[in-house]
């Protein structure tokens, strides 16, 4: 499934509220959302997962296309 994951910082000494850290597009299984760990290392910094949200879209026009958009909100630790 086409997946877009966006990582956003909610709180941190070096970051303002809502600072986007990283965005990636990948081909991931439908259960990728459930496998996101509670702690991540991005840009050589440690972050703790605060909240994550998932939106799935299904398109049935010419061909069936499934896509999911995941927003991961983090706190710097």
Image (cartoon, helix red, strand yellow):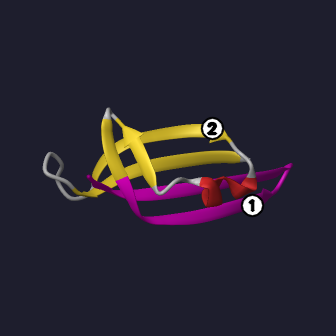
Tally of numbered tags: 2
- What's the residue at 59%, 64% (across, down)? 55
Q: Position of residue 72 (x, y in %)?
A: 45, 57
The dot on residue 26 is 2
Q: In this view, does 34 lie to the left or right of 6?
A: right
- Dot 1 alpha-carbon crowd within 10 angstroms: few under 14, some 14 to 19, many 20 or more: few
Q: In this view, does 7 lie to the left or right of 28?
A: left
Q: In this view, does 4 lie to the left or right of 15?
A: right
Dot 2 falls on a residue whose secondary structure is strand
Above/below status of 12 relative to 42: below
Q: Where is residue 41 in the image (x, y as percent from the top left)?
A: 39, 40
In the rendered image, the residue lying farthest to the left is 13
Which residue position is annotated with label 1? 58
Q: Mark 2 or 1, which is nearer the eye?
A: 2
Q: Is residue 57 magenta?
A: yes
Dominant secondary structure (helix, strand or loop) of the stretch shown in magenta: strand
Q: In this view, does 40 lie to the left or right of 5?
A: left
User: Which stretch appears magenta?
Assistant: 48-77
- Dot 2 alpha-carbon crowd within 10 angstroms: few under 14, some 14 to 19, many 20 or more: few
Q: Position of residue 33 (x, y in %)?
A: 62, 58
In the rendered image, the residue lying farthest to the right is 63
Q: Nearer the viewer, residue 22 or 14?
A: 14
Q: Nearer the viewer, residue 31 or 61?
A: 31
**Quadrant of residue 74 within the rendered picture:** bottom left
**Quadrant of residue 50 within the rendered picture:** bottom left
Q: Say which label, 2 or 1, has the lower sequence index.
A: 2
Above/below status of 4 relative to 56: above
Q: Where is residue 57 in the image (x, y as percent from the top left)?
A: 68, 61
Dot 1 falls on a residue whose secondary structure is strand
Give the spatial CA distance, label 2 vs label 1.
17 Å
């Amino acid at each position: 499934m086409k997946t877009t994951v966006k990582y956003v910082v909610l709180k941190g000494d070096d970051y303002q509220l809502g600072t986007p850290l990283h965005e990636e597009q990948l081909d991931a299984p439908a259960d990728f959302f459930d496998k996101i760990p509670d702690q991540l290392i991005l840009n050589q910094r440690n972050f703790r997962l605060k909240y994550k949200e998932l939106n799935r879209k299904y398109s049935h026009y010419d061909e069936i296309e499934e896509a999911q958009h995941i927003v991961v909100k983090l706190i710097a630790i």
